Image: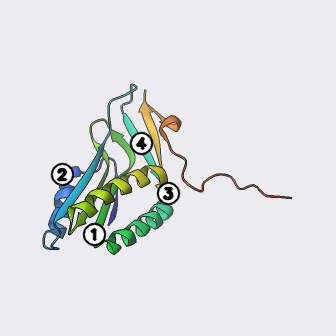
């Protein structure tokens, strides 16, 4: 399950709903990850743009991987502006065994940072400034070179 929210992700509500959805699925582990906007460099928050078709494709590949391990993977992310001390990203793995869930949440969060088509901007002095120094180039992205 992939959910997108305009503004901050409602963490408590979303995690409680996910837990309730899987409560009778006989999973022994529920491992959530919550990303929170930190107060640094004079920002008032972050802002996000998402290219949904690639995000959906990337997440579907992860869903297949989770299913092969007998697990369920859920994710929520923000679009637009997210103020300090609120969440822009949560992910969770439900699994029969804790080791599967622990390993998968770590691998998923790291791959998310490297591969998800989400662009981050600092909100500073009323402006939206691309956070180039904290951004990661998506694998396979770039300009095509045409040979003549």
Q: Secondary structure at mark 4?
A: strand
Q: Secondary structure at mark 3?
A: loop
Q: Earlier in the sequence, mark 3 or mark 2?
A: 2
Decide which of 45, 20 is in the foreground and name it: 20
Tell me the mark number nearer the camera, choosing from 4 and 2: 2
Tell me the mark number nearer the camera, choosing from 2 and 1: 1
Label 4 to label 1: alpha-carbon separation: 31 Å
Dot 4 corresponds to which residue? 47
Label 3 to label 2: alpha-carbon separation: 26 Å
Tell me if 105 is positioned left or right of 25 in this view.
Answer: right
Tell me if 36 is positioned left or right of 139 in this view.
Answer: left
Q: How are the colours assigned in the image?
A: rainbow
Label 2 to label 1: alpha-carbon separation: 22 Å
Label 4 to label 3: alpha-carbon separation: 14 Å
63 lies above or below 122 = below
- Write the residue at 55% across / 54% down: 139
30 lies above or below 25 = above
Q: Quadrant of residue 146?
A: bottom right
Quadrant showing the N terminus: bottom left
Tell me if residue 93 can be seen: no
Percent coordinates x, y for residue 33 in the rendering: 27, 51
Dot 3 corresponds to which residue? 51
Q: Earlier in the sequence, mark 1 or mark 3?
A: 3
Dot 2 corresponds to which residue? 12
Decide which of 80, 136 is in the foreground and name it: 136
């Amino acid at each position: 399950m992939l959910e997108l929210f305009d503004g901050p992700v409602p963490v408590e509500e979303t995690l409680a709903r996910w837990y309730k959805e899987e409560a009778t699925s006989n999973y022994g582990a529920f491992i959530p990850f919550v990303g929170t906007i930190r107060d640094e460099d004079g920002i008032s928050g972050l802002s996000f743009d998402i290219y949904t078709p690639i995000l959906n494709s990337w997440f579907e590949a992860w869903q297949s991987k989770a299913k092969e391990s007998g697990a369920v993977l859920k994710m929520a992310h923000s679009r637009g502006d997210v103020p300090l001390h609120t969440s822009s990203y949560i992910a969770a793995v439900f699994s029969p065994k804790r080791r599967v869930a622990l390993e998968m949440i770590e691998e998923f969060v790291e791959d998310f940072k490297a591969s998800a088509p989400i662009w981050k901007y600092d909100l500073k002095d009323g402006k939206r400034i691309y956070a180039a120094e904290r951004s990661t180039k998506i694998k396979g992205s770039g300009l095509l070179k045409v040979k003549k």
